[in-house]
Amino acid sequence: MALLLPPTGTPSTQNGQGAASARLRAPHGAGGGAEGAAEARPGLLSAHPPRAPGKVLQPRLPAGELREPRPVPEHTACAPMAASPTAAEAVPAWPGNGTRVLCPVDSAFAVRFLPAVYLTVIPLGLLGNGLGLWHLCTGPRQPLSLLVANLGLADLLYVSTLPFLVSYYRQGRVWIFGQPWCRLTRGLFHLNLYASIGFLTCISIHRYRGIVHPLRARGRCQGAASSLWLSVTVWVWVIAQIAPDLAFSKTNAEGTQCHDTTGHEHLGSYFPYTFGVTVTGFVIPFLIIIGCYCHVVFVLCRNDSVEPSLRRRSIALVVLVMVLFSICFLPYHIFRNLNLFFRWKPQESCTQASKDIYISYQVTRGLASLNSALNPLLYVVTSKDWRSRVRTIRQSARQCLRSSFGNKTSFQAAEKSRDITLCEGEASNEL
């Protein structure tokens, strides 16, 4: 059994030898200090490589002396952040896009431009559609009469709302008629827009079948019953498309503005909806109309057996419908979707293009309203005896004017002769 013997030498000798050996093994720690004391401890030299010269380490706090957290003043602790103007305009974006800030727009152009257009559409739309409906109700019934009459009814419904919009823009975009009437006014615009597209599509298909497939179309899909079912189908289809639009809020929180689309907080869900309506309510009917009229023009150019009057009316209908779609409908749908997209651009990416698109969108809104004033031209194109009835109305009006003017002239002549007689009588009395 081995015995453990105590080390030789006194404690002071051992301490001196350990200190000497520590000084010999710590070249960077010579001179004392925390760094030298740390490196002089047994076992530290082999565990850590020598530190670079000139780098001073701060001494650690002794064990048990932990640094207490600095108290936070009450006026800065978790105080709610004041809403800045930029944050006030921030709205939730589409999923995955983060928060977007609305680009500023100048609405002064719409305040000046749209009332002028509406004041032009109101008399033209009322007069043209009123005469057209009177002609369809009193004249001979034709296969297209019911479709054109429904088109005129949609125009009259929309034109009846334009005085309220004129008042809205003339007052600096201040709406005073309430949220329900705002929804109805904006809804009737979309009702007129897509009803016009739907009935124009039906008229185009009707004319296509009558020219390209006259034998198959005769006696089938050409009568009043088929026109009635087509009209009901178009109305149901249009109402189903615009019903979701009525669910979106059309006024701001104060109820002083009437949006043509919706408020900022609902743009994330409104843009996919309006894009889908653009496809189903405009793109698909437009492609159908283009296909029908291309075939119609091809047949009219190659077939000489078509009646000259039918040829003229068919070509005029093709030109009128394409003008309506190219001027009133196509630009509106393009710039409406672009405007909704640019309203969601981040604030730092707002450029002059976003402002130009907003102004272009206001112009196309006015052009879309013009279709209510241009649709009455369909009465002239689709009716065989429209010109003769207009000529009759003109002659009757001229006769009424002549008779009233003749009565006025005879009355003035009688008054003049009476004055002359009185003057002669007075002169004879003086003599």
Image (cartoon, rainbow, N blue to C red):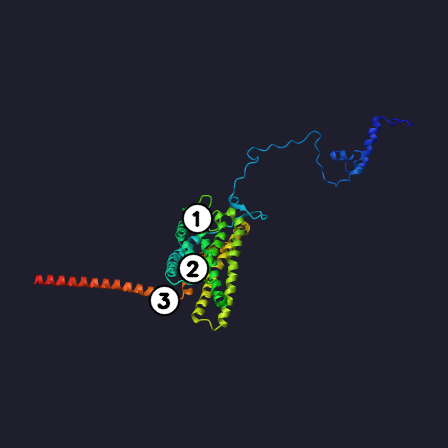
Q: Which residue is mark 1?
A: 182
Q: Secondary structure at mark 1?
A: helix
Label 1 vs label 3, nearer the camera: 3
Mark 2 vs mark 1, CA separation in Å: 30 Å
Q: Nearer the viewer, residue 131 or 231?
A: 231
Q: Residue at x 42, y 64 (%)?
A: 382
Give the image location of residue 355, x and y in percent. Answer: 49, 54
Q: Residue at x 51, y 64 (%)?
A: 290
Q: Which residue is mark 3?
A: 388
Give the image location of residue 383, x and y in percent. Answer: 41, 65
**The disc labelled 3 sits on which kind of residue?**
Ser
**Disc 1 to disc 3: CB gap under 8 Å:** no
| Residue lying farthest to the bottom in this orientation | 304
The answer to whether residue 129 is above or below residue 263 is: below
Give the image location of residue 137, x and y in percent. Answer: 38, 59
Q: Nearer the viewer, residue 405 or 258?
A: 405
Q: Secondary structure at mark 3?
A: helix
Give the image location of residue 12, x and y in percent. Answer: 83, 27
Mark 1 vs mark 3, CA separation in Å: 42 Å
Q: Is residue 81 left or right of residue 316?
A: right
Q: Which mark is residue 340?
A: none
**The disc labelled 2 sits on which kind of residue?**
Leu
Q: Which mark is residue 146?
A: 2
